[in-house]
Image (cartoon, grey):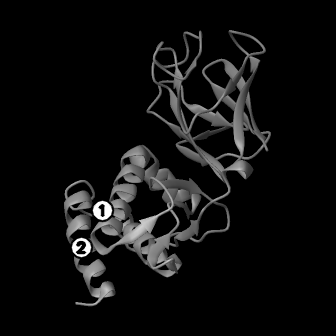
Amino acid sequence: MSLFAKIEELCAGFIERAFAKTFPSDLEPAQIARKLVSTMQSQAQTDDGRLCAPNAYGVAVSPDDYARLAEHREYLQRAWADLLRELAEKVGIVLDGRPEVTLAPRDGVPPGAIVIEPNPQETLAARFVLRTMKGVPPDRVYRLAAQARIGRNDDNEVVLLDASVSRAHASIATGADGAVLTDLDSTNGTFVNGRRIAKQTLRDGDELRFGNTVMRFERET
């Protein structure tokens, strides 16, 4: 059996285990997995008799596709990384280090399209903050993690002392190329630049309102 055929066989079995039950009607995670494997194959080069490939890969999708996948982002990134590790070990590809996969939205990527980048430059990754313009605590700046929840509960990453804000009001999923705001069925709604939204790709300088709290979304590079 050729190396390519062996990888295809192993890949099919892993994808069935990892994604069939979790995403029965959504093929995107499996499609991304196959493209990651294909990219690892194409990047593999012989070095001192060993077949070596990068260990880090960035996955860019459209903001709309990212919004649908963001809830499962951590699981998917781990599953994709596990797939690369398992396949590399079984077919004898030596990776540069522990496999890492990062999913992020990117403007300009068409819906349904997948862009894979080996060795993404983390030093160029954007950082995002929320700055309180009106609310309690005042003048507060929150640096956003990859997945940040906003609400009154103390276990949120952004805790707002505002009775008109729901306990779990909204969430922001961020990546190297963008951020998506999602309303979590809040009582009083989530607004971007005065318009109520369910999901919205954010732009630098957007004004966000949760209850009576007004914040500004900012991008730092």
Gap in angstroms between the C-alphas marked 1 and 2: 9 Å
Please tell me which residue is depicted at 21% across the width and 62% down the height of the picture.
Answer: 20
Determine the image quadrant of residue 207.
top right
- Compared across the picture, whether 6 is left or right of 100 comes to left
Marks 1/2 in contact by CB < 8 Å: the verdict is yes
Residue 86's label in the rendered image is 1
Q: Which residue is mark 2?
A: 10
- Pinpoint residue 144: horizontal percent, then vertical percent: 63, 32
Circle 1 packing at 10 Å, graded few (<14), some (14-19), many (20+), is: some
Q: Earlier in the sequence, mark 1 or mark 2?
A: 2
Nearest the eye: 45 or 36: 45
- Compared across the picture, whether 56 is left or right of 13 comes to right
Which quadrant of the figure contains the N terminus? bottom left
Please tell me which residue is depicted at 50% across the width and 51% down the height of the picture.
Answer: 67
Amino acid residing under circle 2: Leu
- Pinpoint residue 198: horizontal percent, then vertical percent: 52, 43
**Callout 1: helix, strand or loop?**
helix
